[in-house]
Image (cartoon, rainbow, N blue to C red):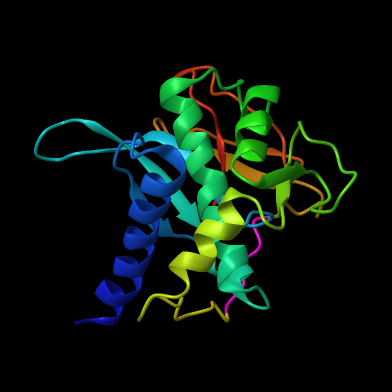
Amino acid sequence: MTLTTQEYKKLDAAFEFFNMRLFNGELPPCLITLTRKRYAKGYFSGGMFVSRLEHKKVDEIALNPVSFTGRTDKDILGTLVHEMVHLQQHHFGKPSRGNYHNRQWANWMESLGLMPSDTGKPGGKKTGQPMTHYIIEGGSFDRACDVWLQGEDIRIGFNSLRASVSTKSNSGSKIKYSCPQCHQNCWAKPDAVLKCGICDQNMEEEQA
């Protein structure tokens, strides 16, 4: 088994496990990627891939391996489930425009044992942008993850030792965004919410 197969097989198996335990197996398949992205532990992109054979759109859940350093497997898997809630809302709920984390998403997160918090600590705002979370001790995710971590050969094997290449402009205060469809570019402050005027697609921070 190659290192690529070994690592992605663990993430795919974790997705299937949490899908069954926390989402009643209702989430559709998606592509899980390891992608460096500044300011993000992970992200969800709806319909950002298309099958070259069946011409069907496929969703993406990306995890940032730069963020793995210093975090436990449970913390990293919490990010996976965080993005799985975005996948759930994309198909079965009402997501807000851009990357805004709305009340519905926050309620679904909390019901699974992940407390939304813009600070990652108790007392933080539960909605907005950007948004992270902390694990509710004894909650559904905490208990399910304890079961998962008792398995064999399921530990996440790699951290990234190379940080993302800076995409800051010469002024040092703005970063580059690109439309995923037509590749139109612009510069804006970090965490800006931008939409392409040509394709009506959410513009994404350019990745290294």
Q: Nearer the viewer, residue 19 or 191?
A: 19
Q: What residue is shown at x 40% (from left), y 30% (from top)?
A: 182
Using the rendered view, name the quadrant where residue 14 is placed: bottom left
Q: What residue is shown at x 54% (from left), y 77% (from top)?
A: 160
Pinpoint residue 130: horizontal percent, then vertical percent.
73, 41
Q: Residue furthest left?
A: 53
Pinpoint residue 161: horizontal percent, then vertical percent.
57, 81
In this rendering, is residue 64 above or below 130?
below
Q: Is residue 164 visible?
A: no
Q: Nearer the viewer, residue 195 or 119?
A: 119
Tell me which segment is drawn in magenta: 162-167
Using the rendered view, name the quadrant where residue 50 is placed: top left
Residue 42: within the magenta?
no
Using the rendered view, name the quadrant where residue 189 is placed: top right
In this rendering, is residue 35 above or below 69?
above
Pinpoint residue 102: horizontal percent, then vertical percent.
68, 25
Q: Is residue 27 visible?
A: yes
Tell me if 50 is positioned left or right of 161 in this view.
left
Tell me if 194 is positioned left or right of 89 in this view.
right
Q: What residue is shown at x 65% (from left), y 73% (from top)?
A: 71
Tell me if 131 is positioned left or right of 72 in this view.
right
Q: Nearer the viewer, residue 118 or 155?
A: 155
Question: Dominant secondary structure of the magenta stretch?
Answer: loop
